[in-house]
Amino acid sequence: MTAQIQQLTPELTLEHINEIPVLILNHSVGSARIALQGAQLLNWQPKGAEQDIFWLSDIEPFTKGVAIRGGVPLCYPWFGGVKQPSHGTARLRLWQLSDYDLQANEVRLEFSLFSEYGVIEAKMKMEFTDKCTMTLTYLGQEPAQAALHSYFNISDISKIEVQNLPSRCFDSLQGKHTDVPSTRRIEQGVDCIYSLEENKTLLVDKAFNRRIRITHHHADSIVLWNPWEKTPSAMQPEGYRTMVCIETARLEKLLQFGESISAEISALTTDI
């Protein structure tokens, strides 16, 4: 149930979806929704695009303190299950909208994460033009991992390919390094961590007639993930067919105070 609508500008409103406050942008550059829990981009549909760029589970309950399945969760200050909760605490905590600027052809939103003592720990900046750029700036004291865990919306897993990947990865499902094609077609569960070689990755979707280009800035790793039939919580049994995760990550060279990691995402809707 959506309630408690707060109008910030003509193009920007703050609403609640169940227990989660969500910022809603309707602007000439496109539309987007961002959950304040986790400063998590949920949807982005640039002007003229027929499809949303990101996938969001259609059974997501938006429960406070529970990870939101879809969009771009922030994994930080650790990645994976090395500690609990899995993928860190930042995606479960409430961030503040600390600044925003809306121009005719550009929108900038900035979110801040504070400790219980009011000390700033991190900032997340989102910029929307004909592309979307998300930048995490780390302001903590202890070195940290981070990943922008982007769930991309696709027509069908059988109709896409991911291009320009390295030809070797760490296969987390097998627990070992393995040689793989640089163009991946996904026919089963995949959970691969690549050391970054090229800073651009392409997601080609023939049925949606588009390419999504992900440019990784200040990253050292790319993660490719699809659970296949082992679907996690808050996902329909067939949900894996319409999503693929391509993550921009800092896993080996830990973030130090003042450093950033960024993902720049462009949708190219020309004929394939």
Image (spheres, rainbow, N blue to C red):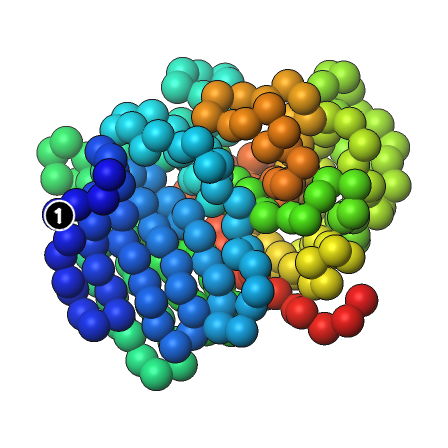
In percent of width and height, residue 210 lies at 70, 63
Q: Residue at x 77, y 57 (%)?
A: 206
Q: Which residue is mark 1?
A: 4
In percent of width and height, residue 183 lies at 84, 47
Q: Residue at x 57, y 65 (%)?
A: 50
Quarter containing the C terminus: bottom right
Q: Quadrant of residue 128?
A: bottom left
In percent of width and height, residue 6 lies at 13, 56
Q: How many marks?
A: 1
Say if 23 sits above or below 117 in the image: below
Left or right side of 136 for 48 = right
Left or right side of 37 for 50 = right
| Residue type for callout 1 | Gln
Left or right side of 144 for 175 = right
Q: Quadrant of residue 193?
A: top right
Q: Residue at x 16, y 64 (%)?
A: 8
Left or right side of 50 for 256 = left
The one nearer the camera, 132 or 155, is: 155
Q: Secondary structure under badge 1?
A: strand
Q: Residue furthest front?
A: 1
Determine if residue 113 is in view. Answer: no
Quarter containing the N terminus: top left
